Image (cartoon, rainbow, N blue to C red):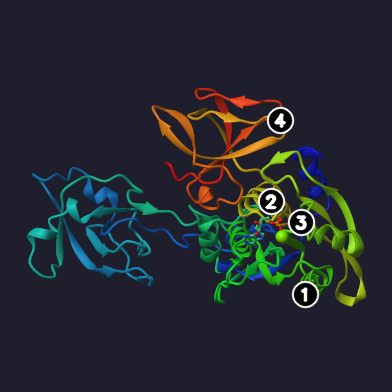
Amino acid sequence: MISVEQALDKILSYVGVLEAEERPILDCLGQVLAEDIYSSINIPPLDNSAMDGYAVRSGDTRGASRQSPRFLRVLGTASAGSITEREVAPGTAIRIMTGAPIPKGADSVVIFEDTDETQRRGVSTEIGILSEVEPGLNIRRAGEDIAQGSTVLTKGTVLRPSEVGVLASLGRTTVRVIRRPIVAILATGDELVDIDQPLPAGKIYNSNTYSLAASVWRYGGIPKILGIARDSEDSVVARIRHGLDADMLLTTGGVSAGDYDVVKDVLAKQGEITFWTVRMKPGKPLAFGTIKAVGKAGVASNIPHLGLPGNPVSSMVTFELFVRPAILKMMGKKNLTKPTIEAVAEDSVVNRDGRRMFARVRVEKRHNQYFARLTGPQGSGILTSMTSASGLMIIPEDKAEVVAGDIVRVMMLDWREE
Ligand code: AMP
Ligand code: MG
C-alpha cells in the first residue's frame, strides 16, 4: 500500500498541461490565460468627469463660498458618449454628466451640490459656484485605468470575473486559454440503475456518476458520462471505448477484492496498473493506471485511468484528493491543493489501522478559533455525511486516536461556515 503523497505524485506524473485554444471570454471563467494581454487603447480614452456637475476653469472659482458665490455663464450640457466642441472660456461653465469628456478649457468639475442649481427653476444660463475647487478635481484622467501599450494581464493568470471584465473593456471577444480537460466517467455495478428509470427491488440509483460529474464541473473540467457498466469485463471494456477520446477516465466501483470487481482486470489487460490501494480511509481500494487508446490521426496514447472505489463517500473523497489536483494541473494551474486550517476537534475519533483518515467534519469559527465536529456516522456509504460536511479532518497514519480538544488539521471543502 502506498501513501497518499506517493499516490498523488504518481498520478500527477502521468498528466500534463493541456494545449491552449481561443475561446469566447465568457466561457473562460476559472481558466488559465495562455497569452499576455496588451492594451492598444487608453482606458478611459479621454479625460472625463467622475461626477455630475459643472466643468469649470478652477481659477474662476477662487474665493467662491456659500456666502459669496461666483457666477458663471452656462454654455450647454456635455453628456457621456459624445465629445463637445464647445470650449470653457473664462467666466463660463458647461454642465457635465459623469463619464462625459472634459470640454476644452475646463480643468475641474464642481459637483451639483456645490452649486446653486437646485435653487434655480428650469434651464438657467447662469450658475452660482459655492465653493473653490483645485485643478483636476473630479476628473478621471485618460489612461488612468489602463495605459495604451501596457501589459494588462499576464500569461498564467487565472481568469475571474474581474479579468473577464478587463478583457471586455479592451474589446476582446475571445482569448487564448489552456483548454478544459474532458473527464470520462463510468459507473460499474450490477446493482445500479440510472436516475431516470424506475427502481426495481434490490437495485440502487447510480449517484456516483452525478456527484463526480458535478465535481468535474466545479473544478473546471468537462464531464463525459459513459453510463453504467455491468460487473463483467466485456461490459466495462465496451463502455470504456466511448471514453477513449477523453483526457482522463474515471470509473467507480469494481476495485475491491470481491468476486465481481473486474475494473482492475480490465486495467491490467487494456493498459497497465500503476498502483492499487492507498493507505487511507475512506478510499483504500483506489486503482490507477493507463488505458491504451488510439487518438486522432492514429497516434497511440495512454489515458490516465483512476479506478475510484464504489462507495459514494470514498469516490468523492478520492476525487478531492487525486482527481481535482490532476484536473487543475491539466488546466495549467499552479496551486493544486485545497486550503487546510487548524481546528480544535470537538469529537474523539479512533484510527487504529495505520491508514490516514479523512473524517467528515463541519467547521465553525467561534472566538477566532476553528472547531471541527464530526458530521455523524462515518460509514463510507453515508453520502449525506458529505452534504453536511465543510471539511475533512486529517488524522495521520500513526495517530491511533484523536481526543476531543486536540488540535487537528482540516482540509477545507467549502467555507460555508463564514
Ligand atoms: P464496489 O466498490 O463496487 O464494491 O461498491 C461499493 C459500494 O458502493 C456498494 O455498496 C455499491 O453498491 C456502492 N456503489 C457502487 N457504485 C455506485 C454508484 N455509482 N452509485 C451509488 N453507489 C454505488
Ligand atoms: Mg461493485
- The part of the image, by quadrant, that contains residue 352 is top right
**Residue at mark 3 to residue at mark 2: CA–CA distance:** 24 Å
User: Which residue corresponds to mark 3?
Assistant: 307
Q: Secondary structure at mark 4?
A: loop
Amino acid type, callout 2: Lys
Between marks 3 and 2 in the image, the one whose residue lies nearer the viewer: 3
User: Is the residue marked by circle 4 packed among few (<14), some (14-19), or many (20+) residues within 10 Å?
Assistant: some
Q: Secondary structure at mark 3?
A: strand
Question: Of 285 and 317, which appears nearest the observer?
Answer: 285
Place of residue 329 in the rendered image (x, y in percent of width and height, measured from the top left): 73, 52
Residue 333, disc: 2
Q: Secondary structure at mark 2?
A: loop
User: Is the residue marked by circle 1 packed among few (<14), some (14-19), or many (20+) residues within 10 Å?
Assistant: some
**Residue at mark 4 to residue at mark 3: CA–CA distance:** 23 Å
Q: Residue at x 42, y 58 (%)?
A: 47
User: Which residue corresponds to mark 1?
Assistant: 242
Q: Earlier in the sequence, mark 4 or mark 3?
A: 3
Q: Earlier in the sequence, mark 3 or mark 2?
A: 3
Q: Earlier in the sequence, mark 3 or mark 1?
A: 1
User: Which residue corresponds to mark 4?
Assistant: 397
Quarter that holds the C terminus: top left
Amino acid type, callout 3: Gly
Q: Residue at x 73, y 61 (%)?
A: 251
Q: Earlier in the sequence, mark 1 or mark 2?
A: 1
**Residue at mark 1 to residue at mark 2: CA–CA distance:** 28 Å
Place of residue 302 in the rendered image (x, y in percent of width and height, measured from the top left): 87, 62
- Ligand 2: give its quadrant: bottom right
Left or right: 369, with 298 as reference point: left
